[in-house]
Amino acid sequence: MADEMLLFEKITQDLVELKDTSEMMMDLAYSALLLNSRYLAEEVRLLEDKVDRLHTEFELLVLSSRVESQETRGLLGLIRMGVVTERIADAAAEIAEVVLRGGEPHPVLSMVIQDAEETVETAVLGEGSLLRGKTLKEARIPEETGMWVLVVKRGDRWIRPRPDLVLQLEDVVIASGYAEGEEDFQGLVSGKPSRD
Amino acid sequence: MIEIERVEYTPVSVRETLILMKDISELMIDLAYSAALFNNRELAEEVTELEDKMDSLVYVLNMNLMLAARDKADAESLAGVAKVGSLTNSISDAAADIAGIVLNDIGIHPIVRKVFQRAEEHLARVQVSETSVLAGKTVNDLDLAAKVGADIIAVRRGKHWMINPEKEIVLPEDILLARGTAMGLESLVRAARGEVDEIG
């Protein structure tokens, strides 16, 4: 009984991670496309490997549960849901590949990219940053810098930019916007004053 | 005989069509997961309908891409766009498969509910009360994504679901389907029930 609880807990954890990661990959892949960002595209490719490993582990766990006959349909539903997350992750990775295939001077997707002037910037939250411990809403990054936060990376976790997300030391904040906002954005997030 | 609609050429903006397809595929995923979480056939059927719409959009997108190519460089560039279009369609196919779990009574394991409680994206269903601050405002004006971190993805009024509402006015007795953070959805649920005077 205790073993079964443990197994179900692990299955739940894996499916949560598959679902979250596949949706995050989709967001990042489209951002990579619309902003013609190789950086984001490469991150999506890395996440794809993680999903493949996780998906195999998840399926093995589901198959190893001792199935009572009345539960088979529910378990099949779980397996199908896992397959869906994996397919979404695959599609996201392939979108990222389209971006990676394009050369720098002539973006493959010149018809779809948002605006050639827009860039993707990353900044690491530093010791001296006023944003430490603040929520994203309080941080007012778009108002102060004109840059729009796409995603926050904490360790190897990717976090969506929700208004109530509390920023921590060493968070990597990834944002898009016009090049003019770049320095203000770096200064605000890192806490190091810009040169001027 | 199976009837499949013939898709006619219409001139469209490639960028806008692709973004529309992206938005629809994302919406389909949320609706499909909602259908699974609440074991709701109607939502699952809405997903299937959106899937048909996506199929037509891919055709129209590809027709426009074919007409846009003038030389080799164009062809190289447009092949990438066509690829993205078909991948977006694959994502919507995946969503339709989740809907299929519900429509074919394959079964929703109790783990699914736990998964949704812990996943980053939460889903909630709530009915709007007479005294709710949400009533009388359009979904766009409520600006819930920025204020609380939750989005209304569908509204059920009487027997109809309105999918991806924007300019629709929220009315008492509407049933809202929303996604967002746990905290955001809690604020939204309280506001819908008329328990608070302000959103957020």
Image: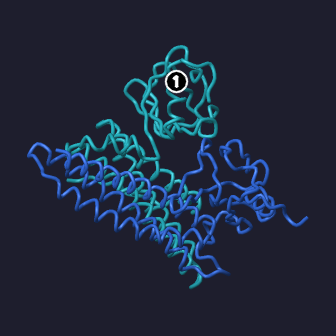
Chain colours: A blue, B cyan
Give the x, y percent position of residue A168.
Answer: 63, 52
Q: Residue at x 51, y 74 (%)?
A: A98
Drawn side of residue A76 relative to residue A49, left or right: left
Quarter of the picture holding the C terminus of chain B: top right
Give the x, y percent position of residue B18.
Answer: 53, 60
Q: Looking at the picture, tell me which residue is in the foreground, B154 or B7.
A: B154
Drawn side of residue A143 relative to residue B184, left or right: right
Q: Is residue B29 above or below residue B185?
A: below
Q: How many marks?
A: 1
Q: Residue at x 73, y 46 (%)?
A: A140
Residue farthest right in this picture: A196
Q: Is residue B130 above or below residue B31?
A: above
Q: Residue at x 11, y 42 (%)?
A: A70
| Secondary structure category for the residue under label 1 | helix
Q: Is residue A42 above or below residue A174?
A: below
Name which residue type carries label 1: Arg
Give the x, y percent position of residue A78.
Answer: 25, 51
Residue farthest left in this picture: A69
Q: Looking at the picture, tell me which residue is in the foreground, A190 or B3.
A: A190
Q: Looking at the picture, tell me which residue is in the foreground, A45 or A158.
A: A158
Task: Write down the residue under mark 1.
Answer: B190
Subunit bearing disc 1: B
Figure quadrant of residue A63:
bottom left
Q: Residue at x 84, y 63 (%)?
A: A194
